[in-house]
C-alpha cells in the first residue's frame, strides 16, 4: 500500500509528464533550431529542444560562417542528416541549412536588386566562381567593373586568367542577375551594382573636367583609367608631351593619378595627362630662337640623324646632313647615345613641333671645301609623294597606336565570352 509521500510523488510525476512537451523526433532533411553547447576541434555540439544532442562536423560547417565567431549558448539553425545510434547523436549540417537560406536570399535579391557582397574562390578565363556554402555562382568577365576588368594585350587567355586569379578572395559588391529555383545557375554582376552611380557620373561629366582615377590597365596604345565607375583611355599620344613608346614607364596598375577629359562620345571617354602640364614647346619658345646654341644629350640615333633630348621631353633632330661638313657614313663615328653635345638651332617652329639642329654649323669649314648653297628650309624635299619632313615627323613620333584596333577587337571577343 502506497504511503502518502509516495502518492504525492506520483501525482507530481504525472503532472510533470502531462506538462512536458511532446517528444518529436526530427526527420531527415528537416531544418531545426538549436543552441550550441560545445565547440571542440572544429566540431560543434548542438542542444535541440533539451531533448536531443546533435553534432555538426567540420565539413558541414560551410564557408559562409566564421568558425571563430561561434560561441556556446549561440542559437543556430541546422539541417538533420540522420542519426548515429552508436553515439546517440543527431548528425546535423549548418552548411546545408545555410544553403537553403542563401538560395532564398538570392531569389529575393534578384527581385529587389539589392547589392550584396561575395568573395570569388576560383577563376577561369571566362570569369570568377563564387561558392556560398556549396551553391555555385559566377561573375562573367563581361560583368566586371572597369577597375577589375582584365585589360590584357592581345586578350591573351593565360594573362587574363593570371589577372583574374589575382582577384580571388577579394570582396565584390554585386547584384544577382540570374538565379534558378534549384540554384544551379546563379549569375552575379559587379557592373550592375554600380549602374546608378555610373549613369549619374556619366550624365554630369563634361569635356575639360579634371578627375582623379585609378590606372586599371596598361596596353601598348595607352593607359586605362577608372573613376566613379567609368573608364577612359589616355592614348599614348596624350601621356606626355615628349615621345612615349612604353606607357608602362609612366604608370602602374592601381596607381592614382589626375587626368583631363578631352573627349566624350557616348560611353567612350578620352583622357589626357599631358594637358595638365604646360606645353614644353611653348616654354622652349620663350627660351630659344633660331641661331641660338643649345647643349643636351643625344637620346637616340636613326637613319635620318641623331635626336637630342631637350627640355620637357622634346626631341630635337640633328639631320644626317648637319652632322659634319664631311660625308657621314656612320653617325656613330661622330656622336654616341648619351653623349652631351652643343648644337646650333637652324630652324624652330613650335606650332608644328619641329626644331632642327646642326653640329657642323658650329664647326669651321675645312680649308678648300666648296659650300653648296642651302635649300629653303621651309620647302620640304619630296620623293615619291612623301616629303622628307613627313618621314622625319613619323620617326620623331613613333608610337604603337595601330595595335589598338586589333587588341580592342580581341578584347571585345573575350568580353562576349
Image: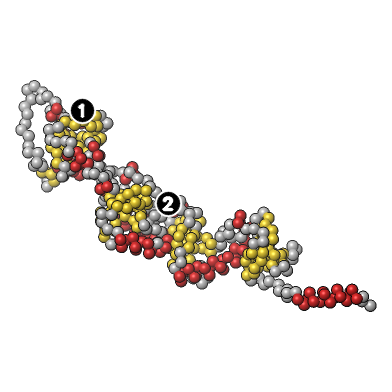
Number of numbered labels in the structure image:
2
Residue 22, picture quadrant: bottom right
Q: Quadrant of the N terminus?
A: bottom right
Q: Nearer the viewer, residue 355 or 417?
A: 355
Examine the rendered structure and indicate whether residue 308 appears above or below residue 219. Answer: above
Secondary structure under tag 1 reads loop
Find residue 68 and report its horizontal and vertical position in percent.
Answer: 61, 55
User: In the image, which is nearer the foreground, mark 1 or mark 2?
Assistant: 2
* Residue shown at the point (32%, 53%) measured from the top left: 211
Q: In the drawing, does residue 249 fall left or right of residue 171?
A: left
Q: Earlier in the sequence, mark 1 or mark 2?
A: 2
Which residue has dot 1 on it?
A: 334
* Residue shown at the point (48%, 68%) measured from the top left: 109
Which residue has dot 2 on it?
A: 163
Crowd around label 2: few <14 · some 14–19 · many ≥20 (10 Å): some
Secondary structure under tag 2 reads helix
Q: Quadrant of the C terminus?
A: bottom left
Q: Nearer the viewer, residue 17 or 231?
A: 17
Q: In the drawing, does residue 206 fall left or right of residue 129?
A: left
Amino acid at each position: 500500500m502506497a504511503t502518502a509521500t509516495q502518492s504525492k510523488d506520483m501525482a507530481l510525476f504525472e503532472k510533470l509528464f502531462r506538462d512536458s512537451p511532446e517528444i518529436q523526433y526530427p526527420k531527415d532533411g528537416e531544418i531545426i533550431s538549436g543552441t550550441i553547447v560545445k565547440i571542440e576541434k572544429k566540431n560543434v555540439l548542438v542542444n535541440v529542444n533539451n531533448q536531443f544532442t546533435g553534432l555538426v562536423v567540420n565539413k558541414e560547417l560551410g564557408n559562409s560562417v566564421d568558425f571563430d565567431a561561434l560561441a556556446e549558448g549561440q542559437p543556430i539553425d541546422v539541417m538533420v542528416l540522420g542519426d548515429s545510434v552508436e553515439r546517440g547523436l543527431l548528425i546535423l549540417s549548418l552548411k546545408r541549412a545555410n544553403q537553403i537560406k542563401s538560395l532564398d536570399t538570392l531569389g529575393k535579391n534578384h527581385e529587389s536588386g539589392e547589392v550584396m557582397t561575395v568573395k570569388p574562390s576560383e577563376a577561369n578565363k571566362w570569369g570568377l566562381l563564387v561558392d556560398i556554402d556549396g551553391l555555385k555562382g559566377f561573375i562573367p568577365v563581361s560583368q566586371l567593373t572597369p577597375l577589375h576588368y582584365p585589360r590584357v594585350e592581345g586578350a591573351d587567355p593565360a594573362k587574363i586568367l593570371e589577372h583574374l586569379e589575382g582577384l580571388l578572395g577579394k570582396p565584390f559588391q554585386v547584384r544577382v542577375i540570374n538565379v534558378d529555383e534549384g540554384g544551379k545557375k546563379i549569375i552575379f554582376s559587379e557592373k550592375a551594382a554600380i549602374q546608378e552611380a555610373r549613369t549619374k557620373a556619366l550624365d554630369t561629366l563634361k569635356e575639360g573636367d579634371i578627375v582623379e582615377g585609378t590606372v586599371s590597365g596598361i596596353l601598348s596604345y595607352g593607359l586605362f583609367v577608372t573613376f566613379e565607375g567609368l573608364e577612359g583611355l589616355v592614348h599614348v599620344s596624350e601621356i606626355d608631351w615628349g615621345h612615349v613608346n612604353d606607357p608602362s614607364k609612366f604608370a602602374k596598375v592601381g596607381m592614382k593619378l589626375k587626368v583631363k577629359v578631352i573627349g566624350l562620345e557616348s560611353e567612350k571617354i578620352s583622357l589626357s595627362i599631358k594637358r595638365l602640364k604646360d606645353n614644353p614647346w611653348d616654354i622652349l619658345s620663350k627660351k630659344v630662337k633660331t641661331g641660338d646654341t643649345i647643349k643636351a644629350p643625344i637620346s637616340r640615333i636613326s637613319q635620318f640623324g641623331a635626336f637630342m633630348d631637350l627640355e620637357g621631353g622634346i626631341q630635337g633632330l640633328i639631320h644626317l646632313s648637319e652632322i659634319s661638313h664631311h660625308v657621314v657614313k656612320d653617325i656613330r663615328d661622330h656622336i654616341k647615345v648619351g653623349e652631351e653635345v652643343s648644337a646650333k638651332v637652324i630652324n624652330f617652329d613650335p606650332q608644328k613641333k619641329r626644331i632642327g639642329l646642326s653640329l657642323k654649323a658650329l664647326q669651321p669649314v675645312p680649308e678648300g671645301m666648296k659650300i653648296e648653297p642651302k635649300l629653303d628650309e621651309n620647302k620640304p624635299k619630296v620623293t615619291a609623294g612623301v616629303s622628307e619632313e613627313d618621314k622625319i615627323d613619323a620617326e620623331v613620333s613613333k608610337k604603337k597606336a595601330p595595335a589598338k584596333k586589333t587588341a580592342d577587337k580581341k578584347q571585345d571577343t573575350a568580353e562576349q565570352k
